[in-house]
């Protein structure tokens, strides 16, 4: 069996594999869906345009059979006359052809979408292999197609028998009515037959569409080795690596900004740097840096803090030291414990006794962490 070699492929296809298959023209298609919409288009043409086609066709036929005597003696006039009749016939058939083409195109676009692939047009010499052909014939796909073909023959055969039996009276009446009315009556009967046939093919298409999607997904399944190879190939792509790093930075920034409302205080430079600190007694051994940034990021942190009522304290030496030596989502350096303790004490006093709260004048920044004279501050 051709499908036995794919038993180890148990993982669903990745987006990359699906895109590669689409580039090769491998998309789910249902001929039955296209056929049903095509039959509906033909039925609509017969029902809504049958009378017009009959009248225009009769006029064209009468015109074609009444050739002027002058035209029979002049090749140029005869050519003009034949061209006029031919254009009239084309004008009659063009709306029907366009409607059926649109219905057929809708069937293709409804499942799989618009796909143009030069690879699909290239000859596939493996299809000439008789062994591979026998394997495809007895595969699950081949057996499914065989079962579907048998089902279509049975359904259409039964439907044709039912239509002929139920319409036997009107069909016999065609022999008795006036010849001018017979074509229109026949068109109505044909339109009804097309509607019944389209309904039958729609039922078959309702089974075929999920079957085609299932077969395509089954064909594109990947083994664990395929998945590992694809991941290795993707990770080796510099553009993908850059994209991953960009997404990681964006997620980290969003997570950082979401943590600002949970902060106890935001210490600023006041305009260039901003650091948000939070401390939960019993959970943290020391205050934790929830967010930090410079320039525009610092302005965003300050704005979020003011929006959520978080105290914003201007302490340039402490803000610079924290920005340079502290890490995001980590506890502050031990050397800054005293300075941050003064800051938190001021914040707690500000909440309890705002009238008596006094901002410290000396933040007790250790000399080794003092960045007052440092003009080359790093950017996190």
Image (cartoon, helix red, strand yellow):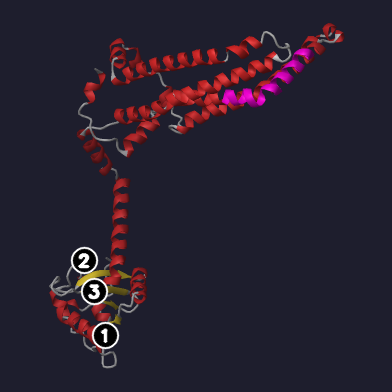
Residue 51 is a magenta residue: yes
Is 176 on the left-hand or right-hand side of 123?
Answer: right
Q: Which dot marks residue 351? A: 1
User: How many numbered callouts?
Assistant: 3
Please give the residue where the numbered disc 3 appears in the rendered image: 277
Disc on the earlier residue, 2 or 3: 3
Residue 40 visible? The answer is yes
| Measured Cα–Cα span from mark 3 to mark 1 | 16 Å
First-in-chain label (3 vs 1): 3
- The residue sitting at 73% across, 12% down in the picture is 178
Question: Element type at marker 1?
Answer: helix
Q: Earlier in the sequence, mark 2 or mark 1?
A: 2
The single residue placed furthest to the top in the displayed view is 73
Label 2, on which residue? 329
Q: Return the residue found at the far right.
A: 70
- Residue 42, image quadrant: top right
Residue at x-position 42% and y-position 14%: 154
The magenta-colored residue range is: 41-63
Q: Pointer 3: residues within 10 angstroms few (<14), some, or many (20+)?
A: many
């Amino acid at each position: 069996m051709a499908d036995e070699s794919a038993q180890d492929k148990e993982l669903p296809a990745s987006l990359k594999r699906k895109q590669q298959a689409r580039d090769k023209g491998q998309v789910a298609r249902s001929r039955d869906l296209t056929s049903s919409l095509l039959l509906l288009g033909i039925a609509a043409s017969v029902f809504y345009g049958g009378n017009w086609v009959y009248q225009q066709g009769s006029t064209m036929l009468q015109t074609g059979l009444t050739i002027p005597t002058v035209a029979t003696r002049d090749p140029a006039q005869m050519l003009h006359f034949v061209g006029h009749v031919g254009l009239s016939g084309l004008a009659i058939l063009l709306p029907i052809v366009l409607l059926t083409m649109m219905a057929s195109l809708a069937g293709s676009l409804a499942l799989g979408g618009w796909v143009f692939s030069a690879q699909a047009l290239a000859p596939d010499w493996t299809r000439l292999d008789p062994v591979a052909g026998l394997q495809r014939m007895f595969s699950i796909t081949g057996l499914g197609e065989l079962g579907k073909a048998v089902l279509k023959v049975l359904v259409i055969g039964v439907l044709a028998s039912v239509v002929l039996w139920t319409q036997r009276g009107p069909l016999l009446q065609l022999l008795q009515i006036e010849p001018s009315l017979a074509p229109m009556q026949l068109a109505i009967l044909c339109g009804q037959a097309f509607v019944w046939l389209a309904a039958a093919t729609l039922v078959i298409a309702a089974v075929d569409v999920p079957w085609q999607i299932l077969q395509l997904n089954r064909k594109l399944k990947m083994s664990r080795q395929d998945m590992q190879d694809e991941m290795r190939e993707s990770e080796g792509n510099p553009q993908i690596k850059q994209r991953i790093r960009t997404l990681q930075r964006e997620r980290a920034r969003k997570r950082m900004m979401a943590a600002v409302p949970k902060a106890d205080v935001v210490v600023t430079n006041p305009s260039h740097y901003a650091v948000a600190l939070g401390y939960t007694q019993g959970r943290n051994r020391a205050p934790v840096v929830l967010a930090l940034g410079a320039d525009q990021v610092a302005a965003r942190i300050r704005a979020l803090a003011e929006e959520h009522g978080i105290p914003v304290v201007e302490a340039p030496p402490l803000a610079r030291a924290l920005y340079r030596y502290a890490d995001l989502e980590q506890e502050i350096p031990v050397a800054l414990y005293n300075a941050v303790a003064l800051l938190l004490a001021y914040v707690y006093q500000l909440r309890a006794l705002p009238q008596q709260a006094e901002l410290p004048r000396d933040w007790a920044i250790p000399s080794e962490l003092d960045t007052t004279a440092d003009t080359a501050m790093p950017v996190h």
